[in-house]
Image (tube, rainbow, N blue to C red):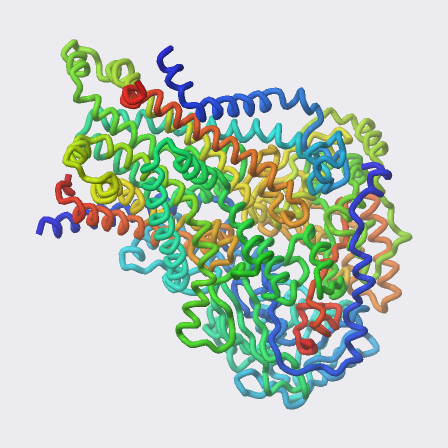
């Protein structure tokens, strides 16, 4: 792809984003009460018990039913939710939360500090691997009274304050789960939370219905009477549903990217790319470091140089997101642009590196991620990029289960993926690089098998260093090392635009976006 | 009495076939890479080995495969299709929840394609070689040769987006108050597009079969005799030829009706129709073994039942045919 | 043979069909000559409409790849899938049908139960499961299509062989002491070739359709350009780039149509009764 060609590309939709700044304007208006929000949910979630199921559709629906202690704004600063105030001790080891008064579970039982202790200390330690890993830094969790919870850490753990969002630590009712088998508790089918909406009905394969929680503790909220989540399996049909007015909200990723500019131009359509600051999805190419061509740093660098990221961003991602230059996404804390060794699009350099290492046309296997058309097209474009510099590529197609298996078994040379970074390198970045996270069976740990004691030590120190300036020094060093090694080929820090009809107001108010519940949303 | 004995033997054979299918599919499905525990663990975005093992143990996937097969077969014999790993519900509930939608869709498509197909086929045969015949056979061929999903997308574009006449997806409008008849009408409106697109392919098949069969029967001696008797061509075609010609078409249709039940994946996907075709496809992608097997068992049972019904109808319509042979 | 040709040529539509099939075949064969550059190569801006640029008369796709080149290479893959899967289905179906029809009795019973068994599973569902299980590739797609395609062949051959079995020439061959195998292959099969040929031409057509449906569900082979892949990949952009789904869709339609016409022509040309009618 030459520069001349790039100028010919379809005009990006960033222009639309600028025109349709969603939240700011809406704040001034008086919310209108009542009405129904029709939202697309894709794919159909396996269940709604957020404490047990962590997949994307569950988080999206259940963010309305359950709540965390905190929320986070676009800059990832904490805001109160079930906690009204919080303090962190001088040494960074004691976190004290004051809870909301007068909160009731959807079944009418009162919510107390005991529920929080049960959730963090018993329930999530058993059911949620991601939360469990972070809770390893916690020594004790106690409730001095019904409205106070104290987390006592073994050592400082900087990212701890970013752990209280609803997806990571949804507070679950102790009176329903204590002493039961959490995974098979029949109450999982009728989730009980403290959130602004209650579960009402699930017609499998068709829709999930949530209704307003009339006893919600924040007076005057929520504004909506009900939310219908529509299950529509075909992407083209989801677009049609929006155009014909059957649904008002298309959360990020629910229509194919190719359709976004067209939908953005339809009447009464508003689009925003906000609400992904916390999750900060970053895409990259996995390299298998265990052997073969991808174990050679020159080959990895050649691949990194060979890929035209700007083309993919324009042609496949509508010009949204930004080109990744290193292992930390743009909105992730402690990102240090200056520390990075960068790999801009440069086929000549790629060819030179290949020549230097004596590449003789051996085939590499490339396993695309079967997450929809955009990802498959992207894999095709990358394959072509690699073939343009002379690398022979064999595409290995699989379905999602097969892909999980192939990556979990390390049976690949190159693959493509994206992972959430959860705001902090200790929560979302280190997991793909540290050797303690090399294990069979998961496509989301250190699948590439990169193992470097120096990096391991830096990440371990970075998690517990105190204060933040100490962390910054360490993480700058990590970014330098990882980019020097071209550990993976970082592609794009993604943004999945949310498309709504313009009469939907105040939908996205935090850095967690649609997953953070609709308590502020209203329909004009 | 004879019919009863025939029924019994067919049923027994049918049950054997279904059991054989269970074994076959069971083996096939377990050959697939990945298992439900890995899929569920993968979906959660972050997992560890312990979590996957915990799921495997819970689902009984850590037992030897023969033990799993034995347990499953023993379940099927007691009409227990097991538990869906992913949805945490008995398979039979999930399947029965979705089956009515599929039966409604395929039933409507079946009736549509059979009536339109036979009528158009007979019409074409009556004008054999004339422009009308060519027109009908060509249209039928075009429908036969167009990919179904493509036709479905086009139908949605034209009738839902541009004209706005019919709803584009789903089985019914959600929410709102409606009495019984309003609800029926609502479902009927939602049914039109999916049923017609699914039916068009089969319509094409029946047009061609009916036409061929009519021409074939028309050549037989008894028709010549009727003509010699001076009956009008119209009466001959309608009363005698069509009646004889339609029999093989109905037989084929009966066999296909069973196949349609599991074959509506495509239509159900495009129109977001909450039927078992989609359920099957999703279960396959999620490696929800029990659910997938459950759908197959139910589909196979439907095919067997439809085949028996077809034979019975055949027997009633045409007493000359010896069913037991 | 000469009589066959003249009978076939009397069926004008069939001749047109044959010409179309031959054209598609030629395009498939000379695709690399027509378009030396890989059809996957991104050569122009994405979504270039047809006729906008004389170098790319049929426009470009979502990534800026030449649609005309894709269609030419797609013809190769679609025809390959169609013919190979049909041949495999014949290789399985014909022997099973012939054995069942020739020997009758328990052999027939056993083989037909086996065949029925495959027909009891909805065929499209079975194809999906097979491709998903063996992971999408050209080979697994061909095998899956063949597996759902052979039972009708077996049933047809069985019926035809059964009818031939009662004929005098077969009795004579048996009396002459010829082995069963010789009788089946040398005596009977040549006499039942015509309905098989007709069925085969239709099977090639339905295989092309089936492959496109599998591609639609995301179960295509990602390393080969087929018409099914093109339609499947274009379905999400059908609104902004009609040509991406219409062109390969029409290619499928025309090929399937042509194969059907050829099939019909063959059926009439090979059917002695229609020959009498025409005379």
Q: Is residue C256 visible?
A: yes
| Quadrant the N terminus of chain A occupies | top right
- Of residues A213 and C200, which is closer to you in this image? C200
Coordinates of residue A264 in the picture (x, y in percent): 72, 59
Classify residue A394 as left or right of residue B203: right
Classify residue B82 as left or right of residue A519: left
Coordinates of residue A237 in the picture (x, y in percent): 57, 56
Label count reads 0
Q: Residue at x 63, y 58 (%)?
A: A254
Q: Residue at x 28, y 18 (%)?
A: C191
Coordinates of residue B28 in the picture (x, y in percent): 41, 43
Classify residue C65 as left or right of residue C175: right
Q: Quadrant of residue C251?
A: top right
Q: Residue at x 32, y 51 (%)?
A: B70
Coordinates of residue B251 in the picture (x, y in percent): 27, 43
- Going by the picture, which residue comes out furthest to the right? A338
- Of residues B305 and A492, which is closer to you in this image? B305
On screen, B8 above or below B247? below
On screen, C222 above or below B161? above
- Of residues A440 and A234, which is closer to you in this image? A234
On screen, A202 above or below A115? above
- Going by the picture, which residue comes out furthest to the left? B1
On screen, C1 above or below A27? above
Q: Is residue B288 visible?
A: no
Classify residue C152 as left or right of residue C36: left
| Quadrant the C terminus of chain A occupies | bottom right
Q: Residue at x 63, y 62 (%)?
A: A242
Q: Quadrant of residue C6?
A: top left
Q: Quadrant of residue A172?
A: bottom right
């Amino acid at each position: 792809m030459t520069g001349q060609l790039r100028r010919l590309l379809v005009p990006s939709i960033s222009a639309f984003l600028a025109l349709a700044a969603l939240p700011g304007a809406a704040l001034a208006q008086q919310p209108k009460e009542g009405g129904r929000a029709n939202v697309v949910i894709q794919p159909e979630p396996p269940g709604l018990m957020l404490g047990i199921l962590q997949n994307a559709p569950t988080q999206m629906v259940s963010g309305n039913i359950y709540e965390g202690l905190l929320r986070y704004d676009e800059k990832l600063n904490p805001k109160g939710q079930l906690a009204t105030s919080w303090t962190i001790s001088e040494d960074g080891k004691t976190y004290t939360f004051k809870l909301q008064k007068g909160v009731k579970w959807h079944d009418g039982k009162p919510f107390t500090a005991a529920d929080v202790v049960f959730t963090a200390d018993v329930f999530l330690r058993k059911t949620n691997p991601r939360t469990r890993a972070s809770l390893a830094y916690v020594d004790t969790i106690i409730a001095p009274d019904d409205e106070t919870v104290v987390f006592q850490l073994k050592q400082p753990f900087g990212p701890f304050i970013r752990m209280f969002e609803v997806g990571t630590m949804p507070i679950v009712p102790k009176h329903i789960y204590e002493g039961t088998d959490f995974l098979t508790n029949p109450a999982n089918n009728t989730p009980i939370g403290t959130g602004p909406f209650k579960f009402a009905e699930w017609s499998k394969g068709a829709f999930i219905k949530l209704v307003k929680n009339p006893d919600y503790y924040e007076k005057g909220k929520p504004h909506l009477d009900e939310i219908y989540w529509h299950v529509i399996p075909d992407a083209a049909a989801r677009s049609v549903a929006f155009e014909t007015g059957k649904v008002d909200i298309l959360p990020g990723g629910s229509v194919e990217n190719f359709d976004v500019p067209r939908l953005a131009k339809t009447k009464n359509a508003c689009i925003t790319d906000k609400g992904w600051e916390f999750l900060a999805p970053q895409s990259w190419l996995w390299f298998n470091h265990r052997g073969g061509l991808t174990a050679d740093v020159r080959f990895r660098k050649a691949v990194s140089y060979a890929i035209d990221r700007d083309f993919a961003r324009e042609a496949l991602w509508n010009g949204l997101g930004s080109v990744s230059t290193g292992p930390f996404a743009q909105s992730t804390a402690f990102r240090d642009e200056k520390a990075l060794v960068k790999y801009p699009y440069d086929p000549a350099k790629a060819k030179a590196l290949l020549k230097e290492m004596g590449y003789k046309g051996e085939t590499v296997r490339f396993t695309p991620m079967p997450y929809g058309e955009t990802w498959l097209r992207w894999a095709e474009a990358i394959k072509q990029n690699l073939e343009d510099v002379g690398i022979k590529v064999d595409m290995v197609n699989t379905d999602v289960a097969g892909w999980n298996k192939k990556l979990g078994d390390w049976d690949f040379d190159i693959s493509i993926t994206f992972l959430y970074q959860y705001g902090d390198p200790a929560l979302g970045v280190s997991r793909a690089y540290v050797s303690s996270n090399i294990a069979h069976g998961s496509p989301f740990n250190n699948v590439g098998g990169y193992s470097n004691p120096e990096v391991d030590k830096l990440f371990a120190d970075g998690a517990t260093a105190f204060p933040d300036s100490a962390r910054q020094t360490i993480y700058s060093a990590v970014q330098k090392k990882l980019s020097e090694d071209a550990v993976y080929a970082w592609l794009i820090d993604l943004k999945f635009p949310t498309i709504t009809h313009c009469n939907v107001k105040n939908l996205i108010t935090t850095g967690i976006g649609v997953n953070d519940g609709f308590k502020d949303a209203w329909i004009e | 009495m004879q019919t009863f004995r025939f029924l019994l033997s067919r049923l027994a054979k049918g049950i054997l076939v279904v059991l054989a299918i269970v074994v076959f599919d069971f083996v096939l499905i377990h050959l697939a890479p990945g298992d439900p525990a890995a899929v569920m663990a993968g979906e959660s975005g972050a997992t560890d080995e312990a979590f996957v093992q915990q799921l495997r143990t819970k689902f009984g996937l850590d037992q030897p495969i023969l033990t799993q097969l034995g347990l499953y077969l023993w379940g099927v014999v007691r009409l227990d299709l097991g538990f869906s790993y992913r949805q945490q519900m008995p398979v039979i509930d999930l399947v029965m929840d979705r089956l009515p939608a599929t039966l409604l869709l395929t039933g409507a498509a079946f009736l549509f394609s059979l009536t339109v197909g036979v009528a158009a086929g007979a019409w074409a045969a009556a004008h054999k070689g004339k422009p009308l015949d060519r027109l009908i056979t060509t249209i039928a061929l075009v429908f036969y040769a167009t990919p179904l999903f493509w036709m479905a997308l086009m139908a949605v574009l034209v009738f839902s987006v541009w004209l706005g006449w019919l709803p584009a997806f789903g089985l019914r409008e959600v929410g709102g108050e409606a009495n019984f008849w309003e609800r029926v009408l609502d479902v009927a409106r939602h049914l039109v597009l999916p049923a017609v697109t699914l039916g068009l392919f089969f319509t094409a098949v029946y047009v061609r079969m009916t036409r061929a069969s009519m021409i074939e029967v028309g050549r037989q001696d008894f028709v010549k005799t009727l003509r010699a008797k001076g009956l009008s061509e119209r009466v001959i075609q309608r009363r005698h030829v069509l009646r004889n010609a339609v029999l093989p078409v109905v037989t084929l249709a009966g066999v296909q009706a069973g196949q349609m039940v599991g074959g509506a994946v495509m239509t159900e996907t495009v129109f977001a129709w909450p039927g078992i075709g989609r359920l099957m496809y999703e279960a396959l992608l999620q490696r929800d073994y029990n659910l997938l097997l459950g759908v197959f068992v139910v589909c196979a049972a439907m095919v067997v039942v439809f085949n028996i019904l077809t034979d019975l109808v055949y027997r009633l319509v045409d007493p000359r045919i010896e069913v037991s042979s | 043979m000469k009589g066959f040709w003249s009978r076939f040529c009397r069926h004008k539509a069939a001749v047109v069909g044959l010409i179309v099939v031959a054209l598609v075949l030629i395009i498939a064969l000379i695709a690399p000559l027509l378009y030396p550059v890989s059809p996957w190569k991104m050569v122009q801006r994405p979504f270039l409409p047809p006729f906008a640029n004389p170098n790319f008369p049929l426009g470009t796709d979502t990534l800026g790849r030449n649609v005309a080149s894709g269609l030419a290479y797609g013809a190769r893959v679609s025809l390959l899938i169609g013919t190979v899967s049909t041949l495999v289905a014949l290789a399985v179906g014909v022997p099973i049908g012939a054995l069942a029809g020739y020997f009758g009795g328990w052999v027939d019973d056993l083989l037909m139960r086996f065949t029925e068994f495959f027909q009891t599973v909805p065929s499209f569902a079975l194809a999906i499961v097979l491709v998903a299980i063996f992971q999408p590739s050209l080979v697994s797609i061909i095998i899956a299509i063949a597996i759902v395609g052979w039972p009708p062949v077996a049933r047809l051959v069985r019926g035809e062989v059964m009818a031939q079995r009662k004929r005098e020439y077969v009795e004579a061959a048996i009396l002459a002491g010829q082995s069963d195998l010789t009788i089946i292959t040398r005596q009977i099969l040549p006499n039942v070739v015509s309905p098989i040929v007709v069925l085969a031409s239709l099977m090639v057509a339905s295989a092309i359709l089936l492959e496109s449906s599998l591609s639609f569900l995301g179960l295509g082979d990602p390393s080969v350009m087929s018409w099914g892949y093109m339609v499947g990949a274009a379905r999400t952009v059908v609104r902004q780039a009609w040509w991406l789904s219409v062109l390969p869709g029409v290619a499928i339609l025309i090929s399937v149509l042509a194969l059907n016409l050829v099939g019909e022509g063959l059926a009439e040309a090979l059917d002695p009764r229609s020959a009498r009618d025409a005379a």
